[in-house]
Image: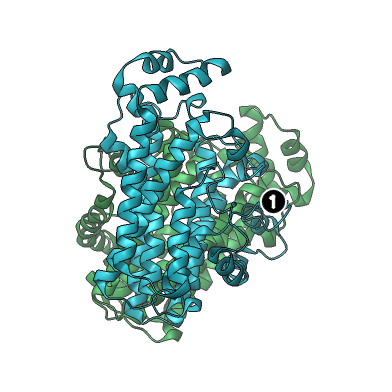
Chain colours: A green, B cyan
Amino acid sequence: MDRKTSLENNKPNSLISSFHALYLPHIENEMQKAVEPACLMGDGTFYDMLAYHLGWSNTGQQTSGKRMRPLMVLLTTQSTGGIWQHAIPAAVALELIHNFSLIHDDIEDNSETRRSRPTVWKIWGIPQAINSGDAMFTLAHIASLRLAETLSPQQTIKAYTIIQKTCLHLTQGQYLDMKFETDKNVSLEAYWQMVEGKTAALFSACMRLGALCSNLQPQQEELFASFGKNLGLAFQAVDDWLGIWGDEQITGKPIASDILEGKKTLPILYGLQQNGEFAKGWKKGNLQAHEISSLAKQLAQEGAQAFTQTYADHYTQEALAALNAANPQGEAGQALFELAQQLLRREA
Amino acid sequence: MDRKTSLENNKPNSLISSFHALYLPHIENEMQKAVEPACLMGDGTFYDMLAYHLGWSNTGQQTSGKRMRPLMVLLTTQSTGGIWQHAIPAAVALELIHNFSLIHDDIEDNSETRRSRPTVWKIWGIPQAINSGDAMFTLAHIASLRLAETLSPQQTIKAYTIIQKTCLHLTQGQYLDMKFETDKNVSLEAYWQMVEGKTAALFSACMRLGALCSNLQPQQEELFASFGKNLGLAFQAVDDWLGIWGDEQITGKPIASDILEGKKTLPILYGLQQNGEFAKGWKKGNLQAHEISSLAKQLAQEGAQAFTQTYADHYTQEALAALNAANPQGEAGQALFELAQQLLRREA
């Protein structure tokens, strides 16, 4: 997800932006406390690598990400009668896990830039970047332990279990994503299994942990988890759509970049299954810029745009149905609906 | 630690080998259960990478490691009146953490073989190997969750905290170790800080978690942790000694391999500080085989062998003093002393 996929297009007067303004200083403060234990006596570089990735040093505008996942956690807690401050350790843990996975993904994908800056491995080399990702991972878990200050030990253990199972799911999704690069035939079933691990699992965990911090009944917790999972699936379908037909000016990436990069996203898998003109052109490989643009048009003509939109719509409906049933309250509840709409109707 | 550093030289009739025979099937069984959740529907390769690293497939003799760390955990529990079976999840978690760190270390060190077989990255490539290490890491944490079946929730949370802080310590040690490769001046203080993270922290956690599973008083738990830490420091000093003057026939590595590889180990740091003939030769770089052997002799003449031995002896004494004070009971207690002696008086 290198595109601007978060909340960069917040309307200034939206509920989301109010809650964001309310939560953000608390999130950043707790995140800094969570990362500080990495400091070594007399040597600041280890800490600096983590701080740099999190956008706390050498930052221009919007280098830190929008902390979308913490926002999901805290809104869920607040909209279900819980004390959102109590959920901050969970919010921070999930944000650090997201960032750990980005540090490692950037190495695995050979990505040299993230948020318009060089990636950690590009600056400090692959060995140090692998290890700094490992540190971010373990700091996430240490952060989550602070849940014990307000939750019962049993609930804390449950939260910890959710986080760990989410991490396993993430690695499974990442395994599949990398495997697809060389697989000749990727089934749609395998594709959705990958997205479930790589994107939806963490979204789902955000809502589930937010709900857990309000001590909800299991049934309501499941509804929130289902909202998160379906939101993640819809989000990825939208992202795949934008990766081919998104506006270059808004996404900040070249047109049809997913074709250029040979990614096997949803519309491309559809196009390959049709085995028509798009598939012929795509399989030829080594594509020139002018071919990319005409391939994107060809792919739309063959029905891939509508096909992708159908999935995006389907999972969006599933997500909103689950959220309706979960019945979040107050302005925080409205903000959750707003968040879903922003994520799924974005242009970038 | 590519040398045969574990318990390959067990005498068949030693107490260690009896306990090893008793514990091993239980450890392997629980470890297999811990790794199984990585299985993906219809795709066995993700699981296979982990199983391969753990020595469960394509195995010749002694490819799995000797599970030294689980042995430490269970002996500590059994020798302090606890039920060793209850400590198995902790033992398995620490062994998986050790193995996660090996998968990533092999990438970071560009090591192509481990235990006479190609490393995970050498077979499946760096991206998949990074991710499989991440999976091993998270499976370790999931394994530790089973402690809640026999420990109180409070004790379980304490165990997680110990495991997580150990992991942070590991990454700090690894950071320093890699940094030393390009540092011109590495102080002894920084060196021991590195060893404390990279080797001693995990040894210490083994004993501490073993003690925790027996519900020991904090003071006695500290003694066991101190035993583990000092054992780890002594172990590394011995390892550094063997890395230069160890018998090629026994270590399975070329003579003075640490000189060949340009590692900054304890005797080499000593030699560099002397700034004599050894330092001159070493700094020249690009050494030939015949020069290595004479440099190793020169280093001994300059006092590095005695210097290293002094540290090994010092930390051995500290370790044994702590173990004596911790006062482990019965044959399992004797086995802990035996284990320390085997590790520290080994020839390889």
In the rendered image of this protein, does residue A178 appear above or below residue A341? above
Residue A236 in the image: state x and y as whole percent.
Answer: 53, 56
- Viewer-nearest residue: A189 or A31: A31
Corner quadrant of residue A41: top left
Q: Position of residue A212 (x, y in %)?
A: 36, 77
Question: In the rendered image, is residue A94 in sight?
Answer: yes
State which chain disc 1 sits on.
A
- Residue A313's image quarter? bottom right
B158 displayed left or right of A165: left
Q: Is residue A55 left or right of residue B41?
A: left
- Residue identifier under label 1: A269
Residue A267: image location, x then y, percent: 64, 51
In front of the other: B13 or B261: B13
Q: Residue at x 42, y 49 (%)?
A: A134
Q: Residue B50 versus residue B294: which sits nearer the camera? A: B294
Instruction: Tell me residue B65's x, y (percent).
Output: 59, 54
Outermost residue toward the front in this view: B13
Residue type highlighted by circle 1: Leu
Q: Of residues B95 and A345, which is closer to you in this image?
A: B95
Residue lying at 47% horizontally and 60% vertically, measured from the top left: B338
Residue at disc 1, secondary structure: helix
